[in-house]
Amino acid sequence: MSFFEKLKSANNSVWSDYTQHEFVRGLQTGTLPRGAFEYYLKQDYLFLIHFARAYSLAAYKADTLAQMKAATATVSALIETEMALHVQYCKEWGISEAEMQKIEEAPENMAYTRYVLEKGHAGDILDLYVALSPCVVGYGEIGKRLSSSPETVTEDNPYLPWIEMYAGEEYQEVSDGAIKQLEDLAEARLTEARFDSLSKTFREASRLEAAFWQMGLDHKAA
Amino acid sequence: MSFFEKLKSANNSVWSDYTQHEFVRGLQTGTLPRGAFEYYLKQDYLFLIHFARAYSLAAYKADTLAQMKAATATVSALIETEMALHVQYCKEWGISEAEMQKIEEAPENMAYTRYVLEKGHAGDILDLYVALSPCVVGYGEIGKRLSSSPETVTEDNPYLPWIEMYAGEEYQEVSDGAIKQLEDLAEARLTEARFDSLSKTFREASRLEAAFWQMGLDHKAA
Amino acid sequence: MSFFEKLKSANNSVWSDYTQHEFVRGLQTGTLPRGAFEYYLKQDYLFLIHFARAYSLAAYKADTLAQMKAATATVSALIETEMALHVQYCKEWGISEAEMQKIEEAPENMAYTRYVLEKGHAGDILDLYVALSPCVVGYGEIGKRLSSSPETVTEDNPYLPWIEMYAGEEYQEVSDGAIKQLEDLAEARLTEARFDSLSKTFREASRLEAAFWQMGLDHKAA
Amino acid sequence: MSFFEKLKSANNSVWSDYTQHEFVRGLQTGTLPRGAFEYYLKQDYLFLIHFARAYSLAAYKADTLAQMKAATATVSALIETEMALHVQYCKEWGISEAEMQKIEEAPENMAYTRYVLEKGHAGDILDLYVALSPCVVGYGEIGKRLSSSPETVTEDNPYLPWIEMYAGEEYQEVSDGAIKQLEDLAEARLTEARFDSLSKTFREASRLEAAFWQMGLDHKAA
């Protein structure tokens, strides 16, 4: 079993709570309230910035030049490409960049992003990447599952492009790369004694991801 | 107007939301559900640890030896004295240390503590102390106000010792010291251009403090 | 006077010791022992990595998205372009990449790079960029001065390409950009009270840069 | 073999260069030039501050409350007790505290202290403590060896109190405690893959310690 599989299997129910959250089911069936998705999208703009900061920190903390290059490529992809795509995508939902820039950051957003960043400072690069993994890999898993599920509504589902993006080859490569990288870091730095602590990080990050979905649902009317 | 007064006055309504939160009114009138307070106490145990970590970071980031000594004295006070007092106090509420050590950290706890710590890494010692101030100074203000308010129920109010502790001379000195320290740091490091960012930090930290009270209310049955 | 000019003028003699170091005069006259330059080039390979780490830290600590993009662009330029150019340039001097990867880092290299990085952690982004500035701007100044000086030997000077690179438009833009950025950060974060501390950072970083040249001279036979 | 023994045996010659440095032999025979020792003492004042900062960082990065308490106790001991003792001791050598506060930090001092601190930021608490160990444990080893060596001059040796301090029970306990702590951290966090990197940290820190002695010798006339 890979390290990532071990993390998941040690946190089965939290992982399900996150990856099969009501918000995700709403994406699948197309019944997610538009307001929930829109609030999620706006928060995701701020999320991306902190996510890029986390990879900048990873570049700083890298053990090797190859790791540093990989992390920096992710930062560049996030702040140059992903944010532009996000802005473009949000425009299609009627949300302007100006609107996103002035939104108040939700506590759920702060909780997850700062948890990840602080874990990175307190620990080593393995701690940091474990904290990031529920997001990077979880979205890949959600995209793949929804895309291949017969229960996924494909007609008139406004969330289909979102599903297809994360199910798409490009994102799946990102997600597979993250699993591979975690494997390499675990080989270098994982000890039996550290597993519980890393598993806890994984569990807490997954819970905070689930809370991020819930934040969307709770603000559906916002 | 002192720097701290400026921060408060720029964030009036958030500051009221926090310092006059329903949880605080419940402490004042003695009507706060015991379960709410007990959950708060358990989370506060974990909070104290992260709070001490924040002062360790402050000691590291100190500009002067005097600042370093002050921050270290706070760390020692927190992990040696305060935590022991907290454990003792919790015992009176029927909560054992073992119980506190195994509690799952609430997202609201993670949000506030990690926000403060991460702000400290990203910025300088002024950023860090501004993020800490709603807690340190806010509790002093709450204690003082409740202790001198005619609306405060003093008979059969199980929360009176809590109020008296924060209204007490010892804590008031801590709180006054924190205001003074913030003033000194502002004199050294505050620019007009930084005020908005520091005010935002103050606002967000105050919101996260209010959410910490709300967490108690929401778990009253837990 | 710009902030950078103020830093320089407060540290005149240290700045001269660095920018007019015997090593620099050796580059100008072409009399620098080859061994000194070669050792310098090998150490510079490791230096570039730590320099890129410093900009990764700057990207993490950035106050704005624009600052973050600028810092990340520098990291990418360093680890993708500059290091490849450096490897190529070293090859012309008969130094292979394998040789550079196994070199023992000189104490002078460690002193400067770790000083910069640690200053970045302890302080804010202004502290970090001030610590970086003697390198970024100093090389631009040296290149420009040597390139336009009548005392510079242009015939059979093996160091002329080095001089021309730093005198070139591309590097001068980098250097001018760094001065401009420092100006912006100073406008946002400089206070009278901080000047002495920042000036000390500038002075120490300049001294460590001078020691980096000296390291080359001392190892001329290595 | 303990982890610390493994680190030493993997870096035998560097460890000897450090612990049997000419400066150390000068302490043993009493022939170390007074100027060398005095310069060393003055630099050591600044060193202690950065050393305390490193333990503050360790307190922040601690995996457990027990580790946090231990690191904080060290910070307190350093900035409250050790610095006062150092000031007192220096006074006996005719060096006032004012003189120490205005001394320019030597590059060798910066190199070692910033290397340790930056290693702590980049890595985890094991990386940090390995970087600190040549100092903490090395001084204990030097003290013990010199104190029991028949070659140590005990009559009219002005450095005998220094030797006796580090050979004394109190410091030996500190040193033994550091070895024990390293052992615990290694048990929790050491992997085969990390050994080379940690051994490199140990080697570099030991080299920088040797350079610190050399700094004293080089400034004997200062």
Image (cartoon, coloured by chain):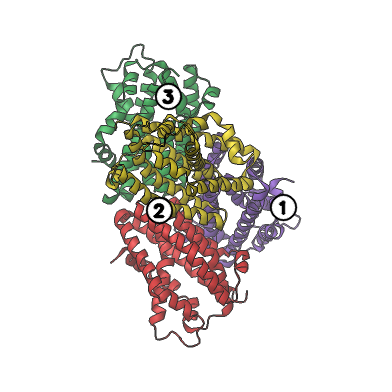
Chain colours: A red, B purple, C yellow, D green
Task: Tell me the amino acid under the disc marked 2.
Answer: Thr
Residue A73, position as x, y percentages in the image: 42, 60
Task: Tell me the amino acid under the disc marked 3.
Answer: Tyr
SS for callout 1: helix
Task: Tell me the amino acid under the disc marked 1.
Answer: Arg
Which residue is labeled 1 in the image? B145
Q: Is the Cβ of the residue at disc 1 closer than 8 Å to that at disc 3?
A: no
Nearest the viewer among C19 and D51 is C19
Q: Nearer the viewer, mark 1 or mark 2?
A: 2
The 10 Å Cα crowd at callout 1, few under 14, some 14 to 19, many 20 or more, is: some
Question: Is A201 situated left or right of A31 in this image?
Answer: left
> Do we see residue D195 in this rendering?
no
Q: What residue do we see at 66% from left, 54% from top? A: B196
CA separation in Å, label 1 and label 3: 55 Å
SS for callout 2: helix
Give the numbered dot on residue C78: none
SS for callout 3: helix
Question: Is D4 situated left or right of C179 in this image?
Answer: left
Residue D17, position as x, y percentages in the image: 29, 29
Question: Is B157 situated left or right of A126 in this image?
Answer: right
Which residue is labeled 3 in the image? D40
Which residue is labeled 2 in the image? C81
> Do we see residue D22 in this rendering?
yes
Residue C206, position as x, y percentages in the image: 49, 35
A39 shown above or below C181? below
Quadrant for the N terminus of chain A, please.
bottom left
CA separation in Å, label 3 and label 2: 43 Å
Furthest toward the front, the residue is C155
Q: The disc numbered 2 marks a residue on which chain?
A: C
Furthest toward the right, the residue is B150
B2 shown above or below A163? above
Q: The disc numbered 3 marks a residue on which chain?
A: D
